[in-house]
């Protein structure tokens, strides 16, 4: 049986060798984390977590990959506001989608099922949520 921690490690390994994390000036400015992100960080970080995995012959799990991007600070007269950095969100989403969509390996495969952007108003950030469907063959 594959565990949620095994699945997180598989996704982590795929991302750690991708242009999202290394090898490009367009990649994230922060770090790649498993399960949680340390408090007080406001860089472009990636957090990978996994919902429960079934214990059937065909194991199913949903993985969340959240890519955080600090908002842009804008001032108009005396009004200050934070706006999503749409250019960075789009660039990082494209890099992550390229790295994670349609991976087929012996014993498992996964693909991106959905993508959405959520605000984190308390920290003046937005994050891209990639929902990944992970399927594994459990023969033991």
Image: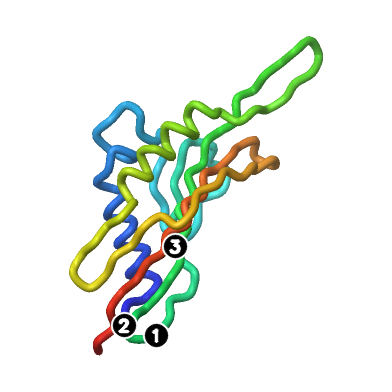
- Of mark 1 and mark 3, the one earlier in the sequence is 1
Label 1, label 2: how far apart the Cα atoms are: 7 Å
Spot occupied by residue 120 in the image (x, y as percentages of width and height)? 64, 43
The residue sitting at the right extreme is: 78
Q: Residue at x 50, y 49 (%)?
A: 115
Quarter location, residue 91 = top left
Mark 1: secondary structure: loop
Label 1, label 3: how far apart the Cα atoms are: 16 Å
* Image quarter of the C terminus: bottom left
Spot occupied by residue 137 in the image (x, y as percentages of width and height)? 28, 79
Is label 1 in contact with label 2 (beta carbons under 8 Å)? yes
Q: Residue at x 36, y 76 (%)?
A: 3
**Residue marked by disc 2:** 1
The residue sitting at the top extreme is: 77
Which is more toward the observer, 32 or 4?
Answer: 4
Is label 3 in contact with label 2 (beta carbons under 8 Å)? no
Label 3, label 2: how far apart the Cα atoms are: 17 Å
Mark 2: secondary structure: loop
- Of mark 1 and mark 2, the one earlier in the sequence is 2
**Residue marked by disc 1:** 55
Decide: is 106 above or below 132.
below
- Of mark 3 and mark 2, the one earlier in the sequence is 2
* Image quarter of the N terminus: bottom left
**Residue marked by disc 3:** 63
């Amino acid at each position: 049986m594959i565990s949620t921690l095994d699945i997180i490690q598989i996704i982590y390994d795929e991302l750690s060798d991708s242009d999202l994390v290394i090898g490009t000036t367009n990649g994230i400015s922060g770090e790649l984390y498993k399960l949680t992100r340390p408090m007080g960080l406001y860089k472009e970080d990636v957090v990978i977590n996994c919902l429960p995995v079934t214990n059937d012959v065909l194991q199913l799990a949903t993985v969340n990959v959240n890519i955080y991007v600090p908002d842009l600070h804008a001032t108009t007269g005396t009004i200050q506001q934070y706006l999503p950095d749409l250019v960075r969100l789009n660039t990082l989403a494209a890099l992550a989608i390229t790295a994670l969509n349609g991976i087929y390996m012996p014993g498992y495969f996964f693909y991106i099922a959905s993508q959405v952007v959520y605000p984190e108003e308390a920290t003046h950030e937005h994050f891209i949520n990639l929902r990944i469907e992970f399927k594994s063959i459990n023969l033991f």
